[in-house]
Every structure is written in structure tokens, then in C-alpha cells.
Amino acid sequence: MAKTDHVPLPAVRRLSLYLRQLEVLHAGDHQTVSSKQLGAALGISDAQIRKDLAYFGQFGHPGIGYRVPELILRVRRILGTDKTSNVLLVGAGNLGRALFSFRGFSKKGFEIVAIFDNNPEKVGRVLDGPTKVTIQPTAEMDATVRDHAIRLGILAVPGPVAQAVADEMVSAGIRALLNFAPVTLQVGKEVAVSSVDLAVHLEQLSFQLGCVSG
Amino acid sequence: MAKTDHVPLPAVRRLSLYLRQLEVLHAGDHQTVSSKQLGAALGISDAQIRKDLAYFGQFGHPGIGYRVPELILRVRRILGTDKTSNVLLVGAGNLGRALFSFRGFSKKGFEIVAIFDNNPEKVGRVLDGPTKVTIQPTAEMDATVRDHAIRLGILAVPGPVAQAVADEMVSAGIRALLNFAPVTLQVGKEVAVSSVDLAVHLEQLSFQLGCVSG
DNA sequence: TTTTGTGAATTGCTTCACAGCA
DNA sequence: TGCTGTGAAGCAATTCACAAAA
């Protein structure tokens, strides 16, 4: 089938973008799309797209392009989102609650099934998002992770406690972390980490502004 | 001073991480730090750090390392965050409000001075974050951008309207966009865009999980 | 000794260009 | 003709390794 040996990491990131655009095309009843069309919509070269997809197999049809519904299914399988994954969230502050209430994860194959926070005023409260979930203390994390077979966790706690909470999550069995705290997490290499730091993004933009004018 | 000609983009992203760690060291009263120490804290090689910094000038002292307070000032100047930038936010939904209430931007040199949303139930309401800001309709964007000399905007609106809102922002004078909507924005190349798509991050992690086990 | 700054070597990623298929 | 898949070429980024400085 595919040559799964060594895929450039940027290619995997782009795969998500392809999927996103394919879903738009599917909703618009497009049956096929060429690498050129897809690239134009995403600001990526057509050769790049063909090469990225070729890392995983042969999906295209010469003279035709890619069949949209077929490619969607196959990309989802590659990303592991053809089946829904249970996700836990730690941190029921403003950001955590906003993330939970975001409808649209489930369409992408992710469902937040548990929320943790150690603030005694929050524990026991029920949050209403795509589903209703009761805030639990982190002491219950081990059992919940086991019972729901959770491997993916979102970390939305303040920076100063992030490392300690991440350690708890990993020790409870979490193997992939989406980190919103502005710190570099130290975790074993059996754990995947993806970080979103708003300040870093703003600084990027600030730098780019400085390149063109004062 | 520096050879500002062609700096690798990844180097600029890392510069933000260096600054973040330097601020931690500064708070802990460290006077100097070596590229090796900095790298160990961030999971980056020492050679990488020296090369990144060298793109912008000579900041280090052989045998000593880098003087922390001095390097902080110089990195901030490079990133353009030595002076505070006014920022506008469009979208006062769950995510937008969470972003606004986040204390910590101002320490990094960014201040959200205006919030826009076209929902009539929201216009006129006052949000209480680091400062109090009244939600305005987007029709007032041109004047506000001009009056506050805003160049940086955060886009936290639903995907289907994101492109239209981005167009408004650019036409009002915004020159850098931090986009949280799950779409690829089409903008002229005089506008810098940085996107955060939560689904893309989760899909990355899902893929990495799939690499090791079922 | 310790540590920087940097040319050289290397690795990794992207683009090119074209054979092959519909 | 239109389009994919892919080796080869080109470009970009990282690591190596060492002279120079404190």
C-alpha cells in the first residue's frame, strides 16, 4: 500500500489542510479535484500536493484528478480520524470552557468526554457544550482515562502549573498533548506534544510587520 | 549591526521561544545563560540557538554566554515588541471573549483596544478584561483602526464568515492577522497571516499516535 | 576552560520536468 | 489534452567542528 517510512512532518500538517478543503468541496458537491485546484485554494503548489499524497499511497487518477469522497475517507484513515477519539480537557477557565463549547470537533472525529480542574468552586459543575460534562478533580484522572480509553489530552491551565499537570496526564496514560500554556513541556518521547502559544503567534506577526515598515 | 537579509522563518519562531525562556530566567535572577543551557530547557540544539541569534547580530560573550537582561531587550526590539502594539479583535463569541480576558498579552507588548461583533445583542456591551472595552459594530472599524493606529488584528469568527470579515479588516488598514477560523484566508501579500486551527493540531497528534500503536 | 560565531558539510524539503496513463 | 506520480535538481535549514575570545 503506502511507503509509510519517513514522511516529512510538514507534509502531515498539510494533509489536515487538504482534508479541510476537501470537506468544503464535498459540501459543494464537487466530485473530483485536481492538485492544481486544491493548491490554488490553499496557496500551495500542485507538485507539493501530489508529492505529499504520494507519501501515503496512490490516490489520484491521471487525466481526472482526485475523487473527493474517496480521498476524504483515505486521508481520515491516515490521520486516524476515521474513528472518533475520546479527548480529555484539563483547565476549566475561560479558554478551557471556550474550547469545550466549540462545536465542530465532533465532526472532525474528536470528542471531549471529560474535564478536569482542581478549583473546588468548579469541581462538580456541569458544562454544556456538544454534550454535558461534569468537572472532575484531577485525582480521578487515572480512572477516567482508563475507563474511556483516552489517549489525547488538551492542556488549558496557567503556565506555572502546566508542567505538573502534564506530568499527571502522562502518568494517567495520556500519550498526546495539545498544550495552550506558554511553556515548553518536558515529556518523554513516547508522548507527542503540540503547542499553541498566542504570544508566539503575535510576535511572529509583529516581526513581519517590522520587516516592511517602521 | 546585523545581516537582516534573509532569515529562515523557523528562526523567527524560535526567537519567541528564546524570549519566553529568557523571561523565566530573568524572573529567577539568572544574569547569564549559555546556548547549551537555553537549548536544554527548550529541546533545541545549542548550535541552532547560536546560529539563530547570529542572524540578527552578535549578542554573546565567549566563555560567558549571553547576558539575560541585555538579550531580552534586544530580542524584543527585533520582534518589535519593545513598544506596545494596539490590537483589535473581531468576534465576541466564546473564543473571542476568552482571548480578550487573557491577562498576559500586555506583558508581551500587545493590548486589545477594540472589539467588533455584528450580533445586535452584543454590540454596546462592555467586556471586562485587562481593560474595559465596548463591543462595536464592524461598520466602525475604519475609524477605530485609524484613530488607534492599529495594524494587528485577531479573527475569532465562525469559518463561513471569516473571509468576508478578513477583507473588511484589511480594507480598514489591518496588516497582520491572527486567524482562528478553520479556513485558508486569501489576502494580498502585503498582509501577514498566522493561523491557529485546533482541528489541525488535534489531527497532527492523532497521526502521531497512530504511528506507534493501533 | 568555557563558550561564542561561523564556514563547511549534511540533512531535509520543495520544485522541476517529464514519462505514463486516461 | 489533462493530470498524476516520481526521479533528479535545487534550495533551505540544521548540524558539525573549530578558530578566536574571555
Image (cartoon, coloured by chain):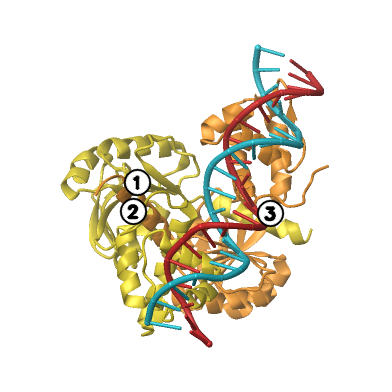
Chain colours: A yellow, B orange, C cyan, D red
Could you tell me which quadrant the N terminus of chain A lies in?
A: bottom left
The residue at the point 68 percent across, 58 percent down is: A208
Question: Where is mark 3, residue-wise?
Answer: A207
Is residue B78 visible to us here?
yes
Per the image, the residue denoted by label 2 is B206
Q: Amino acid at mark 2?
A: Ser
Tell me whether marks 1 and 2 sit on the same chain.
Answer: no
Q: Nearer the viewer, residue A68 or A204?
A: A68
Q: Is residue B119 visible?
A: no
Label 1 CA crowd tier, 10 Å (few <14, some 14–19, many 20+): many
Viewer-side residue, A113 vs A77:
A77
Q: Kindly indicate whether the residue at mark 2 contacts the one at mark 3 (C-beta within 8 angstroms).
A: no
Name the residue: 31% across, 41% down: A118
* Screen quadrant of the C terminus of chain A: bottom right
Q: Residue at x 62, y 25 (%)?
A: B30
Amino acid identity at mark 3: Phe
| Quarter of the view holding residue A144 | top left
Q: Residues within 10 Å of mark 2 (few under 14, many from 20)?
A: many
In the displayed structure, D9 sits above or below D3; it is above
Question: Is B139 rendered above or below residue A16?
Answer: below
Q: Secondary structure at mark 3?
A: helix
Is residue B62 rendered to the left or right of residue A199?
A: right
Judged from the image, the secondary structure of the residue bearing numbered disc 2 is helix
The residue to which callout 1 is attached is A176
Query: In terms of image quadrants, where is residue A106?
Result: bottom left
